[in-house]
Amino acid sequence: GRCLRHPQAWFAMLASCSQDPERLIALGELYARDQLAAVTAAADVEGGAVASCIVHSLFLNVGIEAARAFYSAVLKGPLPGAKFIVDVAKLEQGLGVEVRDVERIRRVFDAGSNVYGSASVDLWLEYYAFERSLDSRASNADAVHWQATASLDDADVFVAHAIAPSGIL
């Protein structure tokens, strides 16, 4: 398998094309192809930061559909880190109610929890907070809480933060 390009190379390419929608879309496609070709993704902070920056730049400069096409392609390969998953879910959650798609957000969180579910407390806390923010009839908060405690290698931190009022811990 191939290694991904160095994160700094991606940041330089992003800086050079962020104002040109066509080049920005092409950069996203190139990143997704590199991601798919890699045996393992750059799951470190920089690898996830590159993907997060590309998705946000696509959203801001081209639109939500371009951002969705990019992150959907990235989700098909080795994932670049739990932070990328959280960033994408937050991007979707920040959309207006008329375009927000709860099931799409759940699919993003589920993709991340399938890969990082045993180790990423932050991912589970964000997923749980999202579910708790929904109308009680639509919420899967209890199921997410159960899944988090069953999946995490050390669920104590999740449980402590999940039951504490915001800002206490």
Image: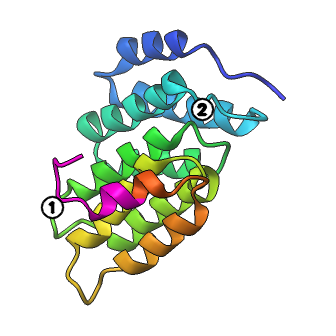
**Mark 2 element type:** loop
Residue identified by numbered label 1: 96
User: From the viewer's perspective, is 10 left or right of 2?
Assistant: left
- At 55% from the left and 36% from the top, the residue drawn is 29
Q: Position of residue 32 (x, y in %)?
A: 59, 37
Q: Position of residue 101 (x, y in %)?
A: 31, 69
The amino acid beneath tag 2 is Ala
User: Does residue 72 show up?
Assistant: yes
**Mark 1 element type:** loop
Q: Quadrant of the N terminus?
A: top right
Magenta residues span 159-169
Of residue 163 and residue 19, the one placed in the foreground of this image is 163
Residue 43: mark in rendering: 2
Above or below residue 98? Residue 49 is above
- At 39% from the left and 79% from the top, the residue drawn is 142
- At 79% from the left and 35% from the top, the residue drawn is 39
The amino acid beneath tag 1 is Gly
Q: Earlier in the sequence, mark 1 or mark 2?
A: 2
